[in-house]
Amino acid sequence: MFVTRILSQTGKYFIMLKEVFNRPVKWSVMRQLIFKEIDDLIIDSLGIVSFISFFVGGVVAIQTALNLTNPLIPKYLIGFATRQSVILEFAPTFISIIMAGKMGSFITSSIGTMRVTEQIDALEVMGVNALNYLVFPKIIALLLFPFVIGLSMFLGVVGGYLAAVYGGFASSNEFITGIQEDFIPFHIAYAFIKTIVFALILATIPSFHGFYMKGGALEVGKASTVSFVWTSVVIILMNYVLTQMLLS
């Protein structure tokens, strides 16, 4: 029963994706919707992403330094570990999961409220493709999500640098040497490839749960919770698959 329901919902999700790109709304209307979504989803997320990234980068550096108890281990490994942790996993994956809570809940609740108040029914009565009108601008807006992740990477490394240097765990030269040590440029590309996939997940799965929800105001809250859970699960699964494909 559970497997059948999962397969049914998965098929319904892919049908929704197809409908998103059918009968597009005219560009003059779509442009305004895209700018609104950029403001709601991207600009409004910069503050919390910056705060979390800066302090988690600092914590990673401190934890690494406190575990380097052997005096023979070079201090530059603090910078190396901070760079690898932030670029490979923390910024692209864990920030995306955090955004599943912030962006995903916002998307599900806003679309779900439109469903409850019959605004979506009104759009469809007027001959508007409601999925294109509601979901497509979110997909386009979240194409800027790599910018958010790039900022997270930068602030994570800066936070690690300040924590290590001003905490007395490593000198500035040692930390910078660690950042430069064995740097593989493809790791940046890998992080941004993951980010683009996660951005599509963040835009579509919460929209799916909001668009097809049934019930009243109470069900909007339940749909937001379910949306967060499934968005996080899919991000973690895709993280595994992409890591296996791109780094193995």
Image (cartoon, rainbow, N blue to C red):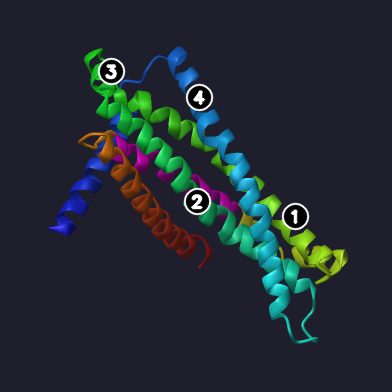
Q: Are marks 3 and 4 in contact (CB under 8 Å)?
A: no
Q: Closer to the N terminus: mark 3 or mark 4?
A: 4
Specify which label sits upstream in the sequence, 1 or 3: 3
Q: What residue would you read off at disc 4?
A: 36
Tally of numbered tags: 4
| 201 relative position to 151: left or right | left
Residue name at image x 80 percent, y 72 percent:
169
Query: Is the residue 188 above or below the residue 244 in the image?
Result: above
Which badge, 2 or 4, comes first in the chain's sequence?
4
Query: Label 2 sits on what residue type?
Result: Ile
Picture residue at 24% right of the left edge, 36% below the top: 212
Decide whether residue 193 is among the magenta residues: yes
Identify the residue under disc 3: 123
Q: Is residue 120 magenta?
A: no
Location of residue 166 with respect to 91 vertically, above or below: below
Q: Earlier in the sequence, mark 1 or mark 2?
A: 2
Q: Which mark is residue 98?
A: 2
The residue tagged with tag 2: helix, strand or loop? helix
Q: What span is colored magenta in the figure? A: 189-210
Magenta stretch prevailing secondary structure: helix
For disc 4, the neighbor class at 10 Å (few under 14, some 14 to 19, many from 20) is some
Q: Residue at x 50, y 51 (%)?
A: 98
Tags 2 and 4 touching, CB below 8 Å:
no
Which kind of residue does numbered mark 1 sit on?
Val
